[in-house]
Amino acid sequence: HLATSLPLPSERDHVRPRIDLIVFMIDIKSKYSLKNVETSLAYVDASFFLGKVCFLVTGVGRVNACSIEMNAVCKLGETYCSPVLFCELELEGIRASTAQRLLRMLQICAGHIPGVSALSFVSLMRNSNDD
Amino acid sequence: ESVDPQKTAFVLCKAWTLYSVTPLYGFRRARLRHYARLLSAFIAAEKQKGLAVEVGVELDIKVALSSLAELRGSELDQAALLVQLSSRSRASSRNSEDKLVWSGWFCSMFGDDFSENVPEDFTCLPLFLTHGAESYTSLVGSWFQKTFDCCFRRLAISPLNLSWMVAMWAGCKLDRAASAVELVFSVPRLAQPLDISYAIHPEDAKALWDTVQKTPGEITQGEVDVFMDCLYAHFHRHFKIHLSAAKLVKVSTGVASAHCDGIVKILHSQYLPEVLMLLTELAISQIQ
């Protein structure tokens, strides 16, 4: 399901399936996309930040078109204890591998992989921060 | 450092195309005349090969290389190196004046962090600015690359860096009446490309920057963000368009203007060192 911003319209709450993973997409060419994500984060229930949220930064292939400061994005990931993935959607190979990664994360968040839960993402992140 | 305005007048009010250059190996400042002769011979040879740059009138290209001690930030910087190509038409009289057809100069303004870590025998002049036909630029560039084993790359300026420039330069105090502060945006993903030009009265822009900047002489990313957000919010209030979703491609102020393709025009000698310092920084970060 794609949405341009949060909150989702409440009229459809009763027919909406369970949400297992929220991927916030930030385009480095658009400052607006970062602002939009920051505003939408306020509408997400705290329980999602236990591994069910990730940030996907797109357009990283074109560094010269960068409108966002990278530090701001990484800080966002740290503040919300959620992983930040980088990709370039215009390259088919990277698009496909990013989609596979997200799908794998979704499977884990939905509980389809025995022995691994969304909480693993949080502990993985804490380990890399301690390095 | 006081800069002799006569010597640096050639920099002002011209559109310079920017390049980053890796350090030059084996460059000797005492041999400038020798280098000029070599470069002149190289250009003549390339023309013989049929890579003629001017069609029609036969032109002899004269090369002049000179050092500009005034154009540097500190004693740790190398003095700027100016390359000038002039032509004298064979058809005209012996006493006719040479016409300047191309100029380019290498410069380092407070680039000491970079030059500190470079081995002996290397000369650091990371910023290269050119004005004139692209064909001459590529001839001069090829000769320097072959002779000093260096590498030239066009210096693109990202929207992030352009917004730093407009915030910094809009805040500069100018004694003469300044021209408007202008930002040009290009809107992506439309059937017909759309450019939006946003002009602000220079005094309003400076007043806004003065309320944002906390410490004079220091600028933070946060302050630049607040400045730009105010401009975006104002525009959105009037036109319901989110400029933050468009691509900033060009900024113009009374001090200087800059285009994302790496083209800069410096209008005011008072801020020449500051502008060159920023451009040197960009060139160095592109090299590293």
Image: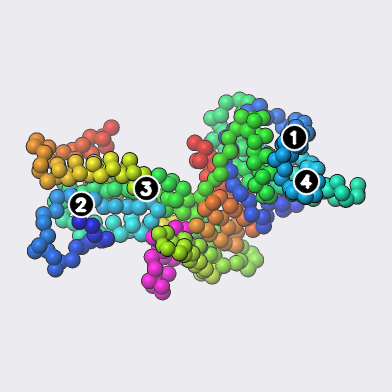
The residue labelled by disc 3 is: A90
- Chain ID of residue with mark 1: B
**Mark 3 touching mark 1, by CB under 8 A?**
no
**Mark 3 touching mark 2, by CB under 8 A?**
no
Residue A101 lies left or right of residue B133; in this view the side is left
Furthest residue to the right? B94
Residue A105 lies left or right of residue B135; in this view the side is left
Residue A61 lies left or right of residue B113; in this view the side is left
The residue labelled by disc 1 is: B45
Tell me how far mark 3 sits from mark 2, CA to CA: 22 Å
- What residue do we see at 18% from left, 38% from top? A123
Badge 3 local density, few (<14 within 10 Å), some, or many (20+)?
A: few
Amino acid under disc 2 = Ile
The residue labelled by disc 4 is: B86
x, y percentage for residue B272? 63, 52
x, y percentage for residue A79? 26, 48
B120 is higher (above) or lower (below) than B136: above
Tell me how far mark 2 sits from mark 1, CA to CA: 63 Å
